């Protein structure tokens, strides 16, 4: 199955896509059958680097361990970053597909676990390699520089690891960052939104310090158990008393450990806290409140030492630049047709680290979701009811052992979406290259369906 696309200025870049689909499908099935856990994407990175080199890209391997970055300089013009993530999950595949994974891996705790591309990152790699191939093959059709980022470990935060590995200084600095995620919406539907598009998640470990002693003589000790209890209770006021009723915030203390025996007052207590938010302002406010409360409760208890905060992982809110998102929505609508590109009514509650690139570079970024579910799963379902009620339970979502995008139509759509999104920058007449907000109108109302999206409930 090929993509029906409108005759647009994108046609020269898409030439030859159909002929490449058998090879791209074979690539996808190979990646799917050989998934690798976060930061262990050695085979995948090798496949990516080999293909990029064969296409004519300048390739750097080993960025943040297993990351691969391709650079294709094609004359003066904007620098555009396109990103795919590569890692799989500790999930036992139950799709029954002929190319289903039987792989196992070793998790960070040393356990052997089944491994599956249950989040569709194999689709992202395939689509970006399809796009890089066409960009290299049709250099007369665009100008500028493309930085193709194949990121490790999205599930645990590989993007900040790439930044820490010198990404900003080692590669051309992009003026816009573009990325996509396959979702259990029907093939052919895309969704995005200006502003927050995916939630932030912050996990941290807090160590409270007391002074141990005999349980019979608490006056000789500083009890970290009581200190921890006060912290846990006081943290419940962060969302209820400091965050507006119309905003989204969650503070959960999911783990609390202290002591070994009933008559020993321990030296320390450890809390593990998870925080969710959908705007940078709320995230900052919650993090500040948690820090303030932990420190203040420790001081109130007479702690002999300041508490220690150690991040476990952190995913910032993924924020789409409004002007750049309008450009991308317009471009996607132009090539895919009216009624297929939707504006999400609110941020998806899943989290992503894609936004780290745009934030670190200080440039706009745009992230969208594209459907990969077999349309047959939606037979008889009124699309309007989908938009209203979310996806039916019968369609496997990301991280499910049954999650299985259909390669045939999904791959060409993903390739086309990447090229369509990048084209407004890469095919701009020379001389006007530069700021994003001059590329197109910032009015989203006429560029996409202003309604709820079929991918809202994808739950990444
Ligand atoms: Zn995921
Ligand atoms: Zn994912």
Image (cartoon, rainbow, N blue to C red):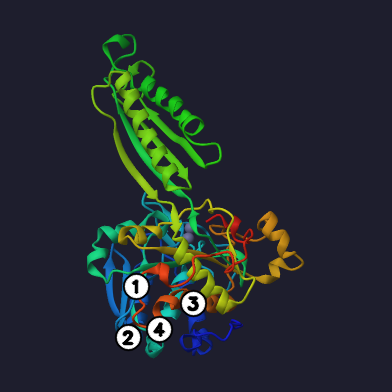
Q: Residues within 10 Å of mark 1 (few under 14, many from 20)?
A: some
The circle on residue 124 is none
Q: CA distance from mark 2 to mark 4?
A: 10 Å
Q: Are marks 2 and 4 in contact (CB under 8 Å)?
A: no
Q: Residues within 10 Å of mark 3 (few under 14, many from 20)?
A: many
Residue 217, compared with residue 57, is above or below; it is: above
Q: Identify the mark nearer the N-term, 2 or 1.
A: 2
- Residue holding disc 4: 135
The circle on residue 434 is 1
Q: Secondary structure at mark 4?
A: helix
Q: Secondary structure at mark 3?
A: helix
Quadrant into which the N terminus falls: bottom right
Query: Does any portion of residue 57 appear in the rendered image?
Result: yes
Q: Secondary structure at mark 2?
A: loop
Circle 3 or circle 2, nearest the eye: 3
Nearest the eye: 435 or 348: 435
- Residue holding disc 2: 56
Q: Position of residue 342 (x, y in %)?
A: 60, 65
Q: Identify the mark nearer the N-term, 3 or 4.
A: 4
Q: CA distance from mark 3 to mark 2?
A: 21 Å
Circle 4 or circle 1, nearest the eye: 1
């Amino acid at each position: 199955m090929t993509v029906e696309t409108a005759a647009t200025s994108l046609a020269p870049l898409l030439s030859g896509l159909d002929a490449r689909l058998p090879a791209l499908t074979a690539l996808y099935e190979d990646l799917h059958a050989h998934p690798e856990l976060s930061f262990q994407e050695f085979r995948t990175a090798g496949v990516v680097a080999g293909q990029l080199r064969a296409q004519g890209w300048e390739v750097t391997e080993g960025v943040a361990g297993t990351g691969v970055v391709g650079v294709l300089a094609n004359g003066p013009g904007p620098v555009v970053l396109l990103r795919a993530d590569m890692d799989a999950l500790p999930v036992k595949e139950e799709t029954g597909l002929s190319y289903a994974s039987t792989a196992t891996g070793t998790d960070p705790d040393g356990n052997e676990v089944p491994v599956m591309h249950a989040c569709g990152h194999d689709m992202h790699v395939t689509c970006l390699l399809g796009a890089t191939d066409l960009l290299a093959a049709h250099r007369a059709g665009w100008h500028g520089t493309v930085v193709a980022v194949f990121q490790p470990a999205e599930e645990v935060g590989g993007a900040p690891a790439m930044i820490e590995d010198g990404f900003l200084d080692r590669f051309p600095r992009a003026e816009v960052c573009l990325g996509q995620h396959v979702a259990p919406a029907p093939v052919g539907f895309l969704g995005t939104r200006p502003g927050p598009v995916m939630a932030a998640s912050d996990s941290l470990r807090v160590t409270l310090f007391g002074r141990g002693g005999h349980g019979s003589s608490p006056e000789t000790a500083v009890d970290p158990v009581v200190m921890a209890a006060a912290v846990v209770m006081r943290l419940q006021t962060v969302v209820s008393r400091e965050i507006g009723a119309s905003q989204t915030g969650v503070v959960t203390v999911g783990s609390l450990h202290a002591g070994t025996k009933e008559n020993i007052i321990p030296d320390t207590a450890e809390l593990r806290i998870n925080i969710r938010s959908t705007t940078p302002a709320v995230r900052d406010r919650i993090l500040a409140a948690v820090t303030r409360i932990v420190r203040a409760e420790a001081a109130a208890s007479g702690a002999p030492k300041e508490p220690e905060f150690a991040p476990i992982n952190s995913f910032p809110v993924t924020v789409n630049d409004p002007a750049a998102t309008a450009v991308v929505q317009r471009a996607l609508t132009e090539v895919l047709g009216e009624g297929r590109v939707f504006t999400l009514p609110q941020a998806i509650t899943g989290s992503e680290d894609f936004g780290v690139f745009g934030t670190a570079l200080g440039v706009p970024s745009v992230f969208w979701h594209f459907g990969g579910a077999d349309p047959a799963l939606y037979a008889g379902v009124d699309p309007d009811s989908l938009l209203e009620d979310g996806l039916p339970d019968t369609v496997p979502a990301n991280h499910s052992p049954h999650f299985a995008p259909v390669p045939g139509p999904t791959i060409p759509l993903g390739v086309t979406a990447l090229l369509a999104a990048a084209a407004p920058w890469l095919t701009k007449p020379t001389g006007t290259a530069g700021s994003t907000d001059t590329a197109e109108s910032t009015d989203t109302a006429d560029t996409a369906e202003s309604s709820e999206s079929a991918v809202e409930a994808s739950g990444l």
